[in-house]
Image (cartoon, rainbow, N blue to C red):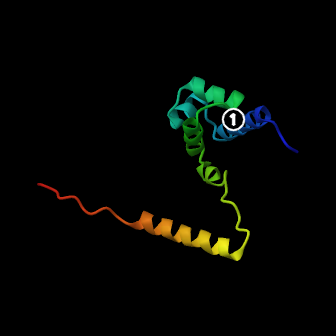
Amino acid sequence: MLKTAPELLTDLGEAIRVRRVAQNWSQIEAAKRAGMAKSTWQRLETYGQATTENLVNAAIALRCEEGLARLFPAPTANSMDELLQQQKKKTASAAKQRKRAPPKNKEW
């Protein structure tokens, strides 16, 4: 069943509330752990509305951050050539991330 944006936001807010309650946290405690105002947390739970940064911080506080990475999966390859190209890009990206910056000269 397809849902409207307001329905999805309401569902998201409810899921956040359920997760918070399962942690036995008040809204004040959850907001504090997420680094936001209580009113922002309340808006997030009630309407599912907040900035992307607030949503990410709430996910981290509630230990759900891995779900965010799966929110927008990469498109699947339509051919073997595309699959090989995607794997090559992923390998190159991982290699770039592993490179370290040269050490800074420290003066003692």
Q: Residue furthest right?
A: 1
| Quadrant the C terminus occupies | bottom left
Q: Quadrant of residue 105?
A: bottom left
Three-letter amino acid code at the position of disc 1: Arg
Task: Please tell me in which quadrant of the rendered image residue 99 appears.
Answer: bottom left
What residue appears at the point 42 percent right and 66 percent down from the top-left corner? Answer: 98
Q: Tell me the residue that label 1 is attached to.
A: 17
The vertical placement of 93 against 48, above or below, is below
Q: Is residue 77 above or below residue 31?
A: below
Quadrant of the rendering where the N terminus is positioned? top right
Bin the neighbour count of mark 1 within 10 Å (Cα to Cα): few under 14, some 14-19, many 20 and up: many
The image shows residue 30 at horizontal and vertical percentages of 57, 34
Where does the image place residue 67, in percent across and percent down from the top left?
65, 51
> Hey, which residue is sitting farthest top in the picture?
39
Quadrant in which residue 40 is drawn: top right
Q: Between residue 83 and residue 29, name the one nearer to us.
A: 83
Q: Residue at position x 61%, y 53% from top?
A: 69
Name the side, left or right, on which 41 lies relative to 1.
left
Tell me where residue 85 appears, x and y as whole percent.
60, 71
Nearest the viewer among 75 and 31 is 75
User: Of all residues shown, which one is farthest toward the left?
Assistant: 108
* Mark 1, secondary structure of its residue: helix
| Coordinates of residue 77 in the picture (x, y in percent) | 70, 68
Q: Nearer the viewer, residue 21 or 40?
A: 40
| Residue found 24% across the figure and 62% down from its top | 103
**15, above or below 74, in the image:** above
